[in-house]
């Protein structure tokens, strides 16, 4: 009986560990958000400031590539920006200004030789016409 309970406990821990390692979507290694008090809602021509928070404590490389992708309204994902971050980096940032109304989506992936890739959850920025 004790052997079965122990085996079941080990199986549960192993299942959670494998699930955490196998899913890179929304990984803790990188997350994107509007900077400071920005809400993600802008008027055409306004500057949006985006911050990527990095957790590279378990990185095996001294530098990682950070690729930010953009999905324009009705479009597919395309590379938007690319950075290199050092292992001691805790954030990256970028700014953008849109000239057309719509919802723009962003996500970022970090990777290095033998590390990742890890992809952030998507964020959406809403640009509307000036009133």
Image: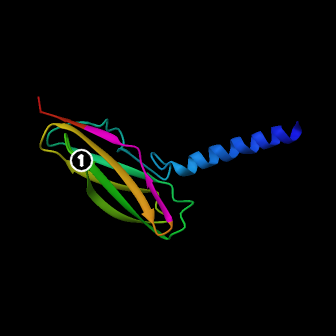
Q: Secondary structure at mark 1?
A: loop
x and y percent of residue 69 in the render? Answer: 30, 52
Q: Please name the residue shown 28% across and 43% down the image.
A: 105
Nearest to the observer: residue 112 or residue 38: 112
| Range drawn in magenta | 115-125
Residue on which the image places disc 1: 76
Q: Is residue 109 left or right of residue 79?
A: right
Graded by Cα atoms within 10 Å as few (under 14), some (14 to 19) or many (20 or more), the crowding at tag 1 reads few
Q: Is residue 34 left or right of residue 14?
A: left
Nearest to the observer: residue 78 or residue 81: 78
x and y percent of residue 80 in the render? Answer: 25, 56
Q: Please name the residue shown 53% across and 63% down the image.
A: 59
Extreme residue toward the top, this view: 131
x and y percent of residue 73 in the render? Answer: 19, 40
x and y percent of residue 66 in the render? Answer: 38, 60
Q: Please name the residue shown 19% across and 40% down the image.
A: 74
Asked if residue 117 is among those painted magenta in the image, a careful observer would answer yes
Q: Characterize the magenta stretch by its predominant secondary structure.
A: strand
Q: How is the image coloured?
A: rainbow
């Amino acid at each position: 009986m004790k052997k079965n309970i122990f085996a079941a406990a080990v199986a549960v821990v192993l299942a959670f560990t494998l699930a955490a390692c196998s899913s890179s979507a929304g990984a803790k290694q990188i997350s994107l958000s509007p900077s400071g008090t920005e809400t993600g809602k802008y008027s055409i021509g306004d500057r949006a400031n985006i911050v990527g928070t990095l957790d590279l404590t378990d990185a095996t490389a001294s530098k990682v590539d950070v690729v930010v992708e953009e999905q324009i309204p009705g479009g597919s994902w395309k590379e938007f920006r690319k950075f290199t971050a050092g292992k001691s980096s805790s954030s990256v940032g970028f700014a953008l200004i849109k000239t057309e109304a719509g919802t723009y989506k962003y996500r970022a992936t970090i990777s290095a030789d033998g590390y990742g890739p890890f992809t952030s959850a998507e964020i959406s920025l809403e640009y509307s016409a000036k009133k």
